[in-house]
Amino acid sequence: MRADIVDKVRSAGVVGAGGAGFPTHVKLQFDVQRVLANGASCEPLLSSDPYLMEHRSGLVLDGLLTAMDCTGSEKGTICLKSKHARALAALKDKILENGYAGRIDVFELEDFYPAGDEFILVNEVLGKIVPEGGIPLNVQVVVSNVESLLNISRAMAGTPVTDRYLTVCGEVNQPVICKIPIGTPVSAAIELAGGPKISDYGIVMGGPMMGKVLTDGSEPITKTTSGIIVLPPNHNVIRDKRRSLDQMRFIAKSACTQCSRCTDLCPRYLIGHALEPHKIMRHLAYNPGMTGEVLEDALICSECGVCEKFACPMMLSPREINAAVKQKLLKDGIKREPKRETYQVSIFNDTRKIPIKRLMERLAVANYDTHPPFYEGKIQVKKVSIPLQQHLGGPALPVIKAGDRVKKGDLIGEIPEGALGARVHTSIDGVVESVSDKVVIKQ
């Protein structure tokens, strides 16, 4: 059974839809005690996961059961916030209706950030601590986003991943949740939401905390695109993500007070990891270059953004600095060994959780929290640009060439032999226009 499930999930190109895109078929090859369905809808403003749990609950549950069967897990738990009352009701009804109550339960999370971080989720639900530099498999757990589970269910029927559910919101005329072909330019998603309200704007792909700022709307939507947020160009979310490392180091040297609030509120520090962002800030401010043992701690940073968007009274950017340091260390092949053998959750963990409402106020995005409807209209996309790398690992190898005619669901990128990766499929019917690090297909 396992080999068949893994092969179908691999063939369909299923990856983690809620994070960096870890190939799902790899996770399913291990025995675990519990499978957690991550429906925490972690980032502010993003609401496609609650929509799927409410309106596609059958597919989500089918995918969860498949993951449980594949990993030998006797129990599965769907994790979502209590505030998503309709999604909770739909899931509970479907569990009872299908007789799953003995194998699947629901865990209701408080409305805090980052509840959807898989390390935090494992600790909240099971009381276990994933070790530094580790993954949930280290504690006999698989965590899978609810859209990934939906894609697992479809994979079992032979349907590959060709579309993505996402939220389009912010300074748009009609915020929506939509299902859109992968490779569609971001600008088309914005037009689907009635277009921008303002003539000059910036675009965030993902959430306001961990998303990236785009230079324009030509960037394609991928398997891991959870949201598109349109904001004024001088908005704090946009501004802070555009600073260079040199600018951040200069500001840190002149303004960082070493108050340690970034460490005090760091979610990874609070579950016992040896990560202290204020020490990284101090080291970089007063030491030339990018060397030093303390900098290696950046490798265990989740880049959740609590330090810079909520904790720092001087509005500095520990998260962006950690991300830059991490990128440099990984490029140099530097690894960080765990500094602790045992972990202890901080006694302050419960009292230092970040309430989503307060976080949205701090980010100045509360007025965009509209819980938009699903777009029911027909989406017509004439041209897509599909990246061959939408996942952790190596890019897929193209198996088509310019001039080939393809249909939606056809394989266009194969996993390199012996490599970590994921297959890529076309999302529309058409003719291959060009092949590089992306495959451009035009109807």
Image (tube, helix red, strand yellow):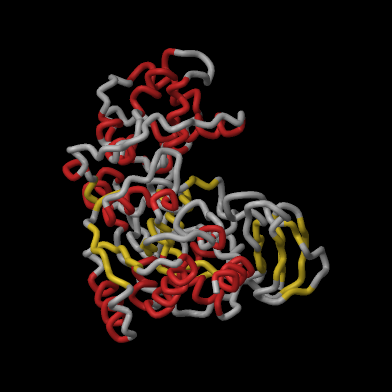
Residue 348 at least partly seen: yes
Question: In the shown orientation, is residue 318 left or right of residue 384?
Answer: left
Where is residue 405 shown, x and y percent of the image?
78, 74
Task: Give 262 or 381, whichever is nearer the viewer.
Answer: 262
Vertical comparison of 202 with 261: above or below: below
Residue at 50%, 29% in the rendered image: 325
Task: Give the residue displayed 71% in from the left and 52% down from the top.
Answer: 437
Is 109 positioned to the left or the right of 268 in the image?
left
* Occupied quadrant, residue 100: bottom left
Residue 37: x, y in percent? 38, 64
Q: Is residue 187 visible?
A: no
Coordinates of residue 50 in the picture (x, y in percent): 34, 68
Locate the N terminus and report the quarter of the image it occupies. Answer: bottom right
* Viewer-side residue, 264 vs 203: 264
Which residue is outermost to the bottom? 97
Left/right placement of residue 367 relative to residue 246 reads: left
In the picture, which quadrant includes the C terminus? bottom right
Nearer to the camera, 128 or 252: 128
246 vs 198: above or below: above
Q: How many marks?
A: 0
Q: Where is residue 404, by image quadrant?
A: bottom right
Residue beneath the point at 38% across and 49% down: 208
Q: Residue at x 25, y 40 (%)?
A: 345
Image spot of residue 379 (x, y percent)? 54, 75
Identify which residue, 123 or 259, lies in the foreground. 123
